[in-house]
Amino acid sequence: MPKETGEKLIASNKKARHEYEILDTYEAGMVLTGSEVKSLRMGRASLVDGYVFFEHGEAWLDAAYIPEYLNGSWTNHAPRRKRKLLLHRQQIDKLSQKTREGGVTVVPLRLYFLDGRAKVEIALARGKREYDKRQTLREQQDKREAERAMRQRNRMGD
């Protein structure tokens, strides 16, 4: 069987980018069971409620939803169990220190396969205030309108 290459996106957390201001991102491996990997290969997962916490010098991803494998038997996994993240010691120490200081949290952004290995992109994030969210939406809307006007103008010129 040929080895997988490249990146295959499984799930992304768009809500996190809306709710939080992303300060820094990290790529982490995950400790998974066989049925979890098979379920992920089917492209089914959700990171919406997921969060990262630190316990005894280890990083854990909790409340991320990986549904049970359809063809699994009694060996199937719990869909919302906590999963250990594989990060370098310095990264774990830095992230746990920042979260202890307060005002920031660590959220998962994307879940994907990279060369056949399941990875999760996590981010150090600060919660946006309501007016920041409205400002971001307004900027996106203005950008869309400007692009639409440019396309309209280019069509007229042809």
Image (cartoon, rainbow, N blue to C red):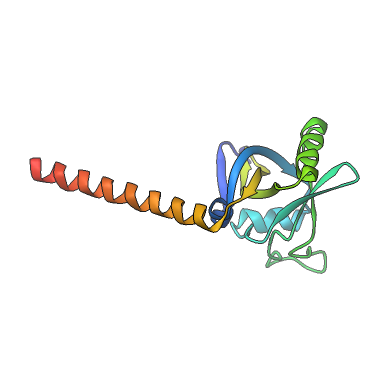
Q: Is residue 102 above or below residue 77?
A: above
Q: Quadrant of the C terminus?
A: top left
Q: Quadrant of the N terminus?
A: top right
The residue sitting at the front extreme is: 131
Q: Position of residue 38 (x, y in %)?
A: 68, 56
Q: Is residue 82 above or below residue 119?
A: below
Q: Is 41 left, or right, of 85 in this rendering?
A: left
Taking the spot 82% from the left edge, 64% from the top edge, the residue there is: 75
Residue 158 visible in rendering? no
Q: Quadrant of residue 66?
A: bottom right
Q: How many marks?
A: 0
Taking the spot 51% from the left edge, 52% from the top edge, the residue there is: 132
Q: Position of residue 96 (x, y in %)?
A: 80, 41
Q: Position of residue 53 (x, y in %)?
A: 79, 50
Q: Nearer the viewer, residue 83 or 5?
A: 83
The residue sitting at the top extreme is: 90
Taking the spot 80% from the left edge, 37% from the top edge, the residue there is: 92
Q: Position of residue 91 (x, y in %)?
A: 76, 34
Q: Is 89 left, or right, of 106 in this rendering?
A: right
Q: Is 8 left, or right, of 71 in this rendering?
A: left
The residue sitting at the right extreme is: 56
Residue 149 visible in rendering? yes
Q: Quadrant of residue 15?
A: bottom right
Q: Nearer the viewer, residue 103 or 80?
A: 103
Q: Nearer the viewer, residue 144 or 9?
A: 144
Q: Nearer the viewer, residue 14 or 41?
A: 14
